[in-house]
Amino acid sequence: MIWGPLTLPNGSSAFPTYHHLGVQVLEMQLIWARTAATRPSEPANPADPAYTWPPALEQAISQAAQYGIALAVMVKGTPAWANGGKDPSWAPNDAKDYAGFLQAASRRYPTVHYWMIWGEPTRAGNLNPMPVNSPVGPRRYALLLDAAYGALKTVTNANQVIGGMTYTTGLVSPSDFIRWMRLPTGAPPRLDYYGHNPYSARFPDLAEGPVPDFSAYRPRPNHPGRLRLPPSKARDINDIDTLHSELAAAYRGRRSGAPKLWLSEFAIPSGGADRAFYFFVSRAEQAHWLTAAFKLVDSASYVAGLGWYELLDEPPSVEGSLTLGLLTASGIPKPAFKAYALAR
């Protein structure tokens, strides 16, 4: 899997590049607040005049089909009409509103069957309310996830619902998020896969235990995502076995067994510290990390897939530019580009 743009810096389609790389799933976002700025009278109807569907997603679906690439769509961002006039990070007052939008989206895009429910809800500012070290946020998220699952399965059982979508750490740790992600009945919400973004300051190696030094995961001073959680509760790529064990405990008794992990994002900066991470490696080492990461998940039967974030570096003109890509900002392949192609 991979995140990335629809066009390359020279203006050409990125899909031949994705095809060359062997990409199976391209991950994209759909912002509810932009698509439904006003309340629809028929929420589950994609033709409702309140909806303004993004042309980019239509374009992606068309081009992806030509190359045999599936799309996974992350749906996030609440319209003000659904959360009492707050900003898009605030959860809707009624999860049914979110569920109705997902039904409309699924009917609008009938070839899309992977649906990610929000993104990194435990990072500050991504989903509110999310008090630090509290079950309040996970329980609110559980309502969203379960409603989304029911809505999407009503449209077609082919829809695969990816819940959780946690990050290595957060205002609530991944382990606590899984433990507290409960419906009012006490049951865990329904889902097909558990999403997690296992960014790491450690070279991918499952033989290592939980991260001993948490300092590498602290963003820059005054960054809204700064944290103070115990090191043992971080879950990076070397802890996915532990994470899945915690998930299995939470879903014990599930007829189909413990959900597999959908590792939506993973990468390592290759151009110095940036606005997201203090840690980084050289371009050659980045390729080494990528190879090791895909080898690691290939050995884990409980992992459904791993997504690299992303295809392109950001331009150096962007403050704190991210250098996580397989290509430079101008489109020149880095060593990681070949490593990704070989990893398939």
Image (tube, rainbow, N blue to C red):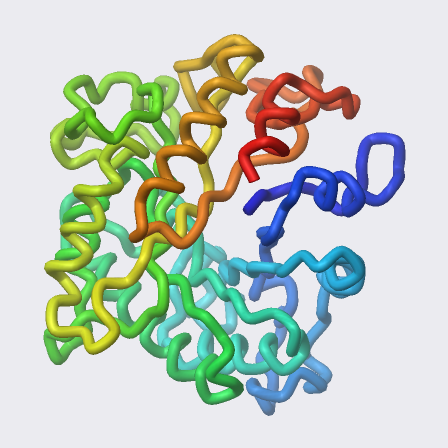
From the top left corner, tell me how far across and down residue 259 is, in percent: 28, 62
Residue at 45% x, 13% y: name it: 280
Residue at 46% x, 61% y: name it: 116
| Foreground residue among 276 and 326 | 326
Seen in the picture, residue 256 relative to 286 is either above or below; the reply is: below
Quarter occupied by residue 144: bottom left
Residue at 31% x, 20% y: name it: 202
From the top left corner, tell me how far across and down residue 290 is, in percent: 49, 27
From the top left corner, tell me how far across and down residue 105 is, in percent: 60, 75
| Foreground residue among 239 and 273 | 239
Answer left or right for 253 relative to 327: left
Seen in the picture, residue 141 relative to 300 is either above or below; the reply is: below
Answer left or right for 21 relative to 300: right
Answer left or right for 144 relative to 343: left
Q: In the picture, which quadrant includes the C terminus?
A: top right
| Foreground residue among 256 and 122 | 256
Residue at 42% x, 69% y: name it: 161
From the top left corner, tell me how far across and down residue 166 is, in percent: 33, 48
Seen in the picture, residue 134 relative to 73 is either above or below; the reply is: above
Quarter occupied by residue 86: bottom left
